Amino acid sequence: MSLRDEFLRLLREDEVFRLAVIGLLGISDIQSTLRQLVDAVGGLARNQSVMMETLNKVLETIQRLTENQEKLWEEDNRIWREVNALREVQSKILEENNKIWQEIKKLIENQEKMWQEIRGLRRDVNVIRKTLDNITASIDEEANDVVTHLLRDRGVNLRTDRVTLNLRFEFDVYGTNGQLTIIGEAKSRVGPRLIARFDEKVNRAVALFPSKFPGKVIKVIYCLRAMPGAIEEAERRGIWLIESMRERTRPSF
Protein backbone atom coordinates (compact mmCIF):
# COMPACT_ATOMS: atom_id res chain seq x y z
CA MET A 1 0.00 0.00 0.00
CA SER A 2 1.33 3.39 -0.95
CA LEU A 3 1.58 6.28 1.38
CA ARG A 4 -1.24 8.07 -0.39
CA ASP A 5 -3.58 5.15 -0.04
CA GLU A 6 -2.71 4.80 3.62
CA PHE A 7 -3.35 8.50 4.16
CA LEU A 8 -6.70 8.30 2.55
CA ARG A 9 -7.59 5.19 4.55
CA LEU A 10 -6.73 6.93 7.79
CA LEU A 11 -8.84 9.94 6.81
CA ARG A 12 -11.77 7.64 6.19
CA GLU A 13 -11.37 5.34 9.14
CA ASP A 14 -9.51 7.25 11.87
CA GLU A 15 -11.60 10.13 13.13
CA VAL A 16 -8.87 11.45 15.46
CA PHE A 17 -6.44 11.50 12.57
CA ARG A 18 -8.99 13.15 10.34
CA LEU A 19 -9.76 15.93 12.88
CA ALA A 20 -6.04 16.48 13.36
CA VAL A 21 -5.53 16.85 9.64
CA ILE A 22 -8.55 19.20 9.40
CA GLY A 23 -7.19 21.28 12.22
CA LEU A 24 -3.80 21.48 10.57
CA LEU A 25 -5.32 22.53 7.27
CA GLY A 26 -7.84 25.12 8.82
CA ILE A 27 -10.72 23.26 7.28
CA SER A 28 -12.79 23.57 10.43
CA ASP A 29 -12.74 27.35 10.07
CA ILE A 30 -13.85 26.98 6.47
CA GLN A 31 -16.64 24.66 7.44
CA SER A 32 -17.70 27.03 10.17
CA THR A 33 -17.66 29.85 7.67
CA LEU A 34 -19.59 27.74 5.21
CA ARG A 35 -22.15 26.93 7.85
CA GLN A 36 -22.47 30.64 8.63
CA LEU A 37 -22.83 31.37 4.93
CA VAL A 38 -25.41 28.63 4.62
CA ASP A 39 -27.28 30.06 7.61
CA ALA A 40 -26.99 33.57 6.17
CA VAL A 41 -28.15 32.38 2.78
CA GLY A 42 -30.99 30.54 4.45
CA GLY A 43 -31.87 33.72 6.35
CA LEU A 44 -31.68 35.69 3.15
CA ALA A 45 -33.85 33.10 1.49
CA ARG A 46 -36.34 33.33 4.31
CA ASN A 47 -36.17 37.14 4.22
CA GLN A 48 -36.50 37.01 0.46
CA SER A 49 -39.62 34.87 0.85
CA VAL A 50 -41.04 37.41 3.32
CA MET A 51 -39.99 40.22 1.00
CA MET A 52 -41.61 38.46 -1.94
CA GLU A 53 -44.81 38.04 0.05
CA THR A 54 -44.66 41.70 1.05
CA LEU A 55 -43.84 42.67 -2.52
CA ASN A 56 -46.76 40.60 -3.78
CA LYS A 57 -49.04 42.32 -1.27
CA VAL A 58 -47.65 45.69 -2.33
CA LEU A 59 -48.18 44.76 -5.97
CA GLU A 60 -51.72 43.64 -5.19
CA THR A 61 -52.33 46.92 -3.37
CA ILE A 62 -50.86 48.84 -6.29
CA GLN A 63 -53.07 46.87 -8.65
CA ARG A 64 -56.14 47.66 -6.56
CA LEU A 65 -55.09 51.29 -6.40
CA THR A 66 -54.58 51.26 -10.16
CA GLU A 67 -58.02 49.74 -10.68
CA ASN A 68 -59.54 52.31 -8.31
CA GLN A 69 -57.60 55.02 -10.10
CA GLU A 70 -58.99 53.81 -13.42
CA LYS A 71 -62.47 53.83 -11.93
CA LEU A 72 -61.82 57.32 -10.63
CA TRP A 73 -60.62 58.37 -14.07
CA GLU A 74 -63.73 56.84 -15.63
CA GLU A 75 -65.91 58.62 -13.08
CA ASP A 76 -64.00 61.82 -13.67
CA ASN A 77 -64.48 61.45 -17.44
CA ARG A 78 -68.19 60.77 -16.91
CA ILE A 79 -68.48 63.85 -14.71
CA TRP A 80 -66.71 65.95 -17.32
CA ARG A 81 -69.01 64.60 -20.02
CA GLU A 82 -72.00 65.55 -17.88
CA VAL A 83 -70.44 68.96 -17.18
CA ASN A 84 -69.93 69.49 -20.91
CA ALA A 85 -73.50 68.39 -21.57
CA LEU A 86 -74.72 70.82 -18.90
CA ARG A 87 -72.63 73.55 -20.47
CA GLU A 88 -74.20 72.82 -23.84
CA VAL A 89 -77.67 72.94 -22.23
CA GLN A 90 -76.71 76.17 -20.46
CA SER A 91 -75.49 77.61 -23.75
CA LYS A 92 -78.77 76.67 -25.42
CA ILE A 93 -80.71 78.18 -22.51
CA LEU A 94 -78.71 81.40 -22.83
CA GLU A 95 -79.42 81.45 -26.56
CA GLU A 96 -83.13 80.93 -25.89
CA ASN A 97 -83.06 83.62 -23.20
CA ASN A 98 -81.43 86.00 -25.65
CA LYS A 99 -84.14 85.19 -28.20
CA ILE A 100 -86.82 85.70 -25.55
CA TRP A 101 -85.32 89.03 -24.52
CA GLN A 102 -85.19 90.08 -28.15
CA GLU A 103 -88.88 89.16 -28.48
CA ILE A 104 -89.64 91.03 -25.24
CA LYS A 105 -87.76 94.03 -26.58
CA LYS A 106 -89.80 93.86 -29.78
CA LEU A 107 -93.01 93.50 -27.75
CA ILE A 108 -92.06 96.55 -25.66
CA GLU A 109 -91.34 98.52 -28.83
CA ASN A 110 -94.61 97.35 -30.37
CA GLN A 111 -96.44 98.14 -27.14
CA GLU A 112 -95.02 101.65 -27.17
CA LYS A 113 -96.15 102.04 -30.79
CA MET A 114 -99.54 100.63 -29.84
CA TRP A 115 -99.86 103.09 -26.93
CA GLN A 116 -98.97 105.93 -29.29
CA GLU A 117 -101.66 104.70 -31.66
CA ILE A 118 -104.11 104.34 -28.76
CA ARG A 119 -103.37 107.89 -27.65
CA GLY A 120 -103.99 109.00 -31.21
CA LEU A 121 -107.22 106.99 -31.31
CA ARG A 122 -108.30 108.48 -28.00
CA ARG A 123 -107.80 111.93 -29.42
CA ASP A 124 -109.78 110.92 -32.50
CA VAL A 125 -112.49 109.36 -30.31
CA ASN A 126 -112.69 112.51 -28.22
CA VAL A 127 -113.06 114.56 -31.38
CA ILE A 128 -115.70 112.15 -32.69
CA ARG A 129 -117.49 112.16 -29.33
CA LYS A 130 -117.56 115.93 -29.26
CA THR A 131 -118.79 115.94 -32.84
CA LEU A 132 -121.49 113.38 -32.01
CA ASP A 133 -122.45 115.31 -28.91
CA ASN A 134 -122.81 118.41 -31.01
CA ILE A 135 -124.76 116.49 -33.64
CA THR A 136 -126.94 114.87 -30.97
CA ALA A 137 -127.56 118.20 -29.34
CA SER A 138 -128.38 119.66 -32.71
CA ILE A 139 -130.73 116.74 -33.50
CA ASP A 140 -132.39 117.11 -30.08
CA GLU A 141 -132.93 120.82 -30.60
CA GLU A 142 -134.08 120.26 -34.18
CA ALA A 143 -136.49 117.52 -33.08
CA ASN A 144 -138.11 119.71 -30.42
CA ASP A 145 -138.32 122.66 -32.79
CA VAL A 146 -139.91 120.54 -35.55
CA VAL A 147 -142.36 118.80 -33.17
CA THR A 148 -143.38 122.15 -31.67
CA HIS A 149 -143.90 123.60 -35.15
CA LEU A 150 -145.94 120.63 -36.40
CA LEU A 151 -148.09 120.71 -33.24
CA ARG A 152 -148.72 124.40 -33.79
CA ASP A 153 -149.80 123.62 -37.36
CA ARG A 154 -152.39 121.30 -35.81
CA GLY A 155 -153.56 124.02 -33.47
CA VAL A 156 -151.77 122.62 -30.41
CA ASN A 157 -149.71 125.20 -28.56
CA LEU A 158 -147.23 122.96 -26.74
CA ARG A 159 -143.50 123.43 -26.26
CA THR A 160 -141.37 120.24 -25.92
CA ASP A 161 -137.90 119.70 -24.45
CA ARG A 162 -135.67 117.01 -22.93
CA VAL A 163 -136.85 115.27 -19.76
CA THR A 164 -135.30 112.90 -17.20
CA LEU A 165 -137.71 110.80 -15.18
CA ASN A 166 -134.90 108.78 -13.57
CA LEU A 167 -131.54 107.33 -14.61
CA ARG A 168 -133.22 104.69 -16.78
CA PHE A 169 -135.82 106.87 -18.39
CA GLU A 170 -134.53 109.89 -20.27
CA PHE A 171 -136.30 111.23 -23.36
CA ASP A 172 -135.22 113.79 -25.95
CA VAL A 173 -138.75 115.11 -26.55
CA TYR A 174 -141.36 115.71 -23.85
CA GLY A 175 -144.22 118.09 -23.29
CA THR A 176 -147.72 118.03 -21.81
CA ASN A 177 -150.68 120.43 -21.38
CA GLY A 178 -152.80 118.09 -19.27
CA GLN A 179 -154.94 116.87 -22.17
CA LEU A 180 -152.07 115.79 -24.45
CA THR A 181 -148.60 114.40 -23.68
CA ILE A 182 -145.84 114.18 -26.28
CA ILE A 183 -142.99 111.78 -25.53
CA GLY A 184 -140.22 110.89 -27.96
CA GLU A 185 -136.59 110.48 -28.94
CA ALA A 186 -134.31 111.96 -31.58
CA LYS A 187 -131.95 109.69 -33.53
CA SER A 188 -129.69 110.08 -36.53
CA ARG A 189 -131.32 106.98 -38.04
CA VAL A 190 -133.87 104.41 -36.91
CA GLY A 191 -134.92 100.91 -37.89
CA PRO A 192 -137.72 98.54 -36.87
CA ARG A 193 -135.88 97.19 -33.81
CA LEU A 194 -135.13 100.64 -32.38
CA ILE A 195 -138.78 101.61 -32.87
CA ALA A 196 -139.91 98.47 -31.02
CA ARG A 197 -137.52 99.15 -28.11
CA PHE A 198 -138.66 102.77 -27.92
CA ASP A 199 -142.33 101.71 -27.81
CA GLU A 200 -141.63 99.28 -24.93
CA LYS A 201 -139.59 101.90 -23.07
CA VAL A 202 -142.42 104.44 -23.24
CA ASN A 203 -144.94 101.86 -22.05
CA ARG A 204 -142.79 101.07 -18.99
CA ALA A 205 -142.32 104.78 -18.25
CA VAL A 206 -146.09 105.39 -18.44
CA ALA A 207 -146.68 102.49 -16.03
CA LEU A 208 -144.04 103.78 -13.57
CA PHE A 209 -144.80 107.52 -13.80
CA PRO A 210 -148.50 107.87 -14.70
CA SER A 211 -148.65 111.44 -13.38
CA LYS A 212 -146.14 112.49 -16.04
CA PHE A 213 -148.41 111.28 -18.85
CA PRO A 214 -151.85 112.92 -18.48
CA GLY A 215 -154.37 112.88 -21.29
CA LYS A 216 -153.65 111.31 -24.67
CA VAL A 217 -150.05 110.07 -25.05
CA ILE A 218 -148.41 110.57 -28.46
CA LYS A 219 -145.17 108.71 -29.07
CA VAL A 220 -142.86 110.45 -31.51
CA ILE A 221 -139.49 109.59 -33.07
CA TYR A 222 -137.52 112.22 -34.95
CA CYS A 223 -134.71 110.96 -37.21
CA LEU A 224 -132.49 112.11 -40.01
CA ARG A 225 -132.94 108.83 -41.85
CA ALA A 226 -135.52 106.03 -41.59
CA MET A 227 -134.15 102.59 -42.43
CA PRO A 228 -136.17 100.07 -44.49
CA GLY A 229 -139.13 98.75 -42.50
CA ALA A 230 -139.04 101.62 -40.00
CA ILE A 231 -142.11 103.40 -41.43
CA GLU A 232 -144.18 100.21 -41.47
CA GLU A 233 -143.19 99.39 -37.86
CA ALA A 234 -143.99 102.92 -36.70
CA GLU A 235 -147.35 102.81 -38.50
CA ARG A 236 -148.19 99.45 -36.92
CA ARG A 237 -147.38 100.72 -33.41
CA GLY A 238 -149.10 104.10 -33.84
CA ILE A 239 -145.85 106.07 -33.48
CA TRP A 240 -145.46 109.50 -35.01
CA LEU A 241 -142.36 109.16 -37.23
CA ILE A 242 -140.71 112.32 -38.52
CA GLU A 243 -137.80 112.03 -40.93
CA SER A 244 -135.83 115.22 -41.60
CA MET A 245 -138.83 117.50 -40.87
CA ARG A 246 -141.18 115.32 -42.95
CA GLU A 247 -143.97 113.37 -41.33
CA ARG A 248 -143.72 109.75 -42.42
CA THR A 249 -146.68 108.68 -40.28
CA ARG A 250 -149.65 110.73 -39.04
CA PRO A 251 -151.18 109.48 -35.78
CA SER A 252 -154.54 110.90 -34.68
CA PHE A 253 -154.47 113.66 -32.07
Image (cartoon, grey):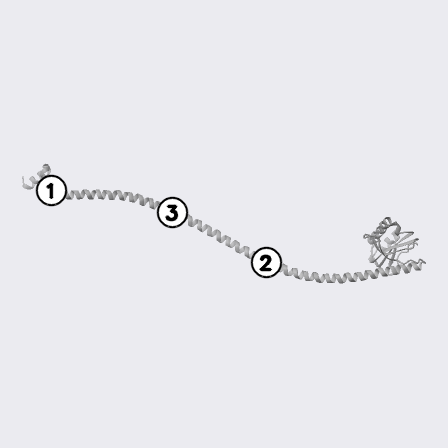
Residue type, label 2: Trp
Q: How many marks?
A: 3
The residue lying at 69 percent from left, 62 percent from top is 117
User: Residue 243 location in percent, x, y?
Assistant: 86, 59
Label located before the other in sequence (1 or 2): 1
Work out whether residue 191 or residue 149 is closer to the camera in this orientation and state it: 149
Work out whether residue 230 or residue 171 is closer to the camera in this orientation and state it: 171
Give the Cα separation between the discs numbered 1 and 2. 110 Å
- As helix, strand or loop, the secondary structure at mark 2 comes to helix
Residue type, label 1: Gly
Q: Which mark is residue 65?
A: 3
The residue lying at 59 percent from left, 58 percent from top is 101
Residue type, label 3: Leu
The residue lying at 74 percent from left, 62 percent from top is 124
| Quadrant location, the N terminus | top left
The residue wearing badge 2 is 101
The residue wearing badge 1 is 23
Quarter assignment of residue 10: top left
Q: Residues within 10 Å of mark 2 (few under 14, many from 20)?
A: few
